[in-house]
Image (cartoon, rainbow, N blue to C red):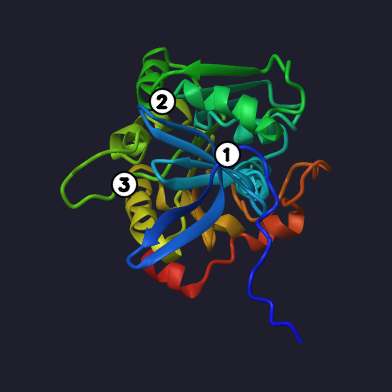
Amino acid sequence: MVKEIMADSLVTEEKGVKVLFGEFVNMDYLFCYIGRIIYGESGVQNIYILENKFWGRMLFINNNLQFTSRDEFIYHEALVHIPVQASPKGSIKRVLICGGGDYGAAREVLKYPQIEEVVIVEIDPKIPKIVEKYFPQLLPENSKDNRLKLIIADAYDMVKQYRKEEQKFDLIIIDSTDPDISETGVTQELSHSLFDVEFHQMIYEICPKGIIIQQCATPFTMKNILIKAYKIFKQVYPENEIYCYKANVPSFGSDNAYLMRCPYPDPEIPKWKEIPNTYYYSYEIHRSSFGLPKFWREVLK
């Protein structure tokens, strides 16, 4: 019997060098991915797109995974459909998305024909262009939907302007990167000011009777982000209008948290007609999303 010692070379694949890409999650804990970097740039933000055989295309900003083409729909459907369905049917006409230049949240909001206007305020002009080229599935189903308006600006400054103009919205979605948590005060993330008491006081003024939703990372590995955001919500909004719900996004490694200010009763009960063109959201998912682990509730006391 011949012992096989040598092996044939790998079959020639596509252009590009395969890399092992590491994302630090916590102390001595990281996620690693093998793939090709098909886009990379260091500018206002460090942006990389990795092509991976399992996850598909993966967008990293400042070395943190934002979404993958395989499971982004879970994050975006939970972010949008739960707050919309928590409101009385037809009560949301005007929506402001702070961040969200990847179009994912807008794609979901525009599935409701009753909603008349959706405004995205994105700070980085490159994000929409990158998504249009590399992640076309995140674009709205109707690419010419005239209800959608994209503004390239700092959401903090834009909200300040809207407040001065006394504009009003029925739903505000804060769809941003996670904030910096630094002992030295170093601020790298452009979203840092959106996790701020003054910012929430301003959006409360322009959305006094509507719903405000903010993504708050994965508490299992980043509980301080949820705690900080919850303290801000309690400083600004009536405590009986503050709710937390979750969605399990596989590429994030654990449940993602969402904080919601909802002035309407029984947000756990969906109130609009269930839309057919979703992959994650359903009435059953809506109700179960508010069932939080006991260890989450302990830090939200």
Secondary structure at badge 3 equals helix
Counting from the top left corner in percent of width and height, residue 287 is at 68, 59
Residue type at numbered disc 3: Gln
At x 50% / y 55%, what residue is drawn? 257
Q: Which residue is mark 1?
A: 16
Please rate how many residues cluster around mark 3, counting C-alpha atoms within 10 Å: few if below 14, some from 14 to 19, many from 20.
few
Mark 2 and mark 1: Cα distance apart in space: 36 Å
- Lateral position of residue 263 relative to residue 28, left or right: right
* Mark sitting on residue 41: none
Counting from the top left corner in percent of width and height, residue 182 is at 23, 50
Mark 1 and mark 3: Cα distance apart in space: 50 Å
Residue 165's quadrant in the figure?
A: top left
Counting from the top left corner in percent of width and height, residue 290 is at 59, 61
Secondary structure at badge 1 equals loop
Q: Quadrant of the C terminus?
A: bottom left
At x 68% / y 40%, what residue is drawn? 88
How many numbered callouts?
Answer: 3
